Image: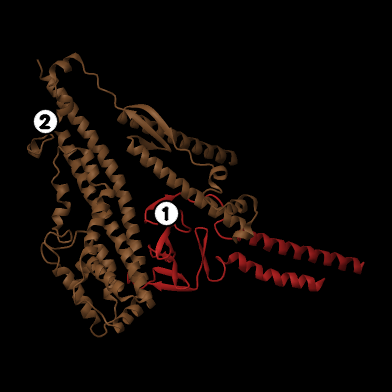
Chain colours: A brown, B red
Amino acid sequence: MALLQCFYMRMQTFLTALTSVVLVLAMAVTVAQAKGKLVKTEEFTPPDIKEQFCGGNIDYRICKCAFHGQMCKDIGKSQSQADHLLYFKYNTHVAGLRATFKGGCSDRGGLFENDKCLYFEEEKEELSDKEKECLPKDFETNWKKYSDIDDAIPIGERSNEAKEFADALASMRTNAEARFIIARDMEIDRLARQELRAYKTALVQNIKANLLRSFWRLAWVTYDTAAGASLPGKDMVQGAASTGKTFAKLFEEVEDKGDLLIKLGNLLSVARSVTPGDSKLAINTDSTTGKFKSLGLTTGISVLENLGDPAGAAQVGVSVFGEIVGIPMPPKADITPEEIEILRTQHLSNKAVDDVLQESYRVNSERRRELAILDEEFAAQKARALEWEAKERDRVKNEIVDSCK
Amino acid sequence: MKHQLIAILCVSMFVPTTALAVGGENSVVVGGFDYVYDEVVVADTDKDGTSDRTSYYTAGKLILTAYDENGDGKNDRWFEWKEDKVTLEMSATKGGEPDEFIVVDGNEKALTVETSKGGAGTGGGLMNWIAILAVIGAAAWLYNKKKQLKGSDVA
């Protein structure tokens, strides 16, 4: 019985290993076929932890303690604690180097896989004599004009390949739009947190001018949600309402004492009413994402990729917040020392600022996870679009050649 | 001999408490990192009647936030803080201890880090069990010796 069990376990292990090898080979073949001929490989090599990391990137005493149990008292850690800290810092350092390597690989047109940067060369298609004779001279560079990938052709009259391509492109468009908004809102949130920390410092140090300025800016971030439904055509940038909802707690949780709530409410109303028509904060929600919707079928996939690039979207967030910072405070915005004391009690002693900061980071963490999922989906959608684009090209080429006498 | 045995057994009663403790007094260990705190604030952020966020403070400064996101009574996401900024995010994707670590730099750029392969998860747990076994072993040896001495006295 024991022998049978042992044999079964070994078979299971063998089959698992075999399946993994087959899958890896299949993927390698698919990648190679998709990309062309592999012409160069660069390998990412992490630094040696003892020779290259210890001393230069971390207090050498942590290494001494972790590896040799020496100098542990100097750093106030046990050997196991030093070992844990050392490997965590080392793994963080390696992750950073790997991310830089991967970024450089991508910039140079390579494909990063399993700590290697692979460079492929597109294999030029060898045309037959008949193909050379029948295909138009500009087919190589301008084949789409001979295809059904054309917005002017009704959907029902397009080839199956063109329909599938359009569908894949539409998915990419929706995805790019979602990633754009998330990346933009993450940046707005980050800048709002910066403002909130400045507000907290002003509260602690009791600097009224700084306190009011930060509060005014935070009111702008918040107003779309806290002030209720916005005026038609002047709603805040789509999606940033989730940021406003987080920061609205600063205004909602202030105890109703005297005129303070009314004054805060006034700040928000003023923020909404002074928004100029061409303000980035007042643009119609459609126009934020309008540039995605307006993209036609003949738009290159790479253009869509660039539009949805999180780095670019973050820049929009910076410019939106920059506009908020530039808006002057209304002349009558002022609060009394007693009201400042109320804010200190509510926002510092009762930890409302900490409450908002924690919520903001948690929401952003969820956004980051959402972005990671969208990135993966975008890659799959792009692969699908490229596949159907290639099939449509082949269909058109064969059709022209077949009809050629 | 009898007094020595009793003394050792009394000491050994206190040793298990050091093995079972999760960090020292007013400290919590998460992902192998020890957080010493002097204030805890519990909150129900989704207003469902159960607390889902625990905030740890030292000298009025936030150092750690723990969330129970799936409502099973165990924390599954943690944020480490320094000067009102998150520096490390940890998640327990399979329940229990964190297995995903995201380091956040000064510009709030996130970097996923592979879980540390070195060191013990909790500070000193193994050593404490060794200490318990050593004490029990010493007590047993003394007891045996006493029994032998008693036997030889009778003889």
Residue at numbered disc 2? A145
Q: Position of residue A125 (x, y in %)?
A: 25, 22
Q: Position of residue B18 (x, y in %)?
A: 61, 67
When asked about the image quadrant of residue A238, the answer is: bottom left
Question: Horizontally, is A88 left or right of A381 in the view?
Answer: right
**Can residue A334 be seen at all in this image of the molecule?**
yes
Provide the secondary structure element on which disc 1 rests: strand
Q: Distance between the residues labelled 2 and 1?
A: 47 Å
**Pointer 2 indicates a residue of which chain?**
A
Q: Are marks 2 and 1 on the same chain?
A: no
Question: Horizontally, is A282 left or right of A347 in the view?
Answer: left
Count the labels in the image: 2
Residue found at x 39% / y 28%: A40
Contact, mark 2 vs mark 1 (Cβ under 8 Å):
no
Q: Position of residue A156 (x, y in %)?
A: 9, 38
Provide the secondary structure element on which disc 2 rests: helix
In the image, which disc is placed on residue B102?
A: 1
When asked about the image quadrant of residue A110, the answer is: top left
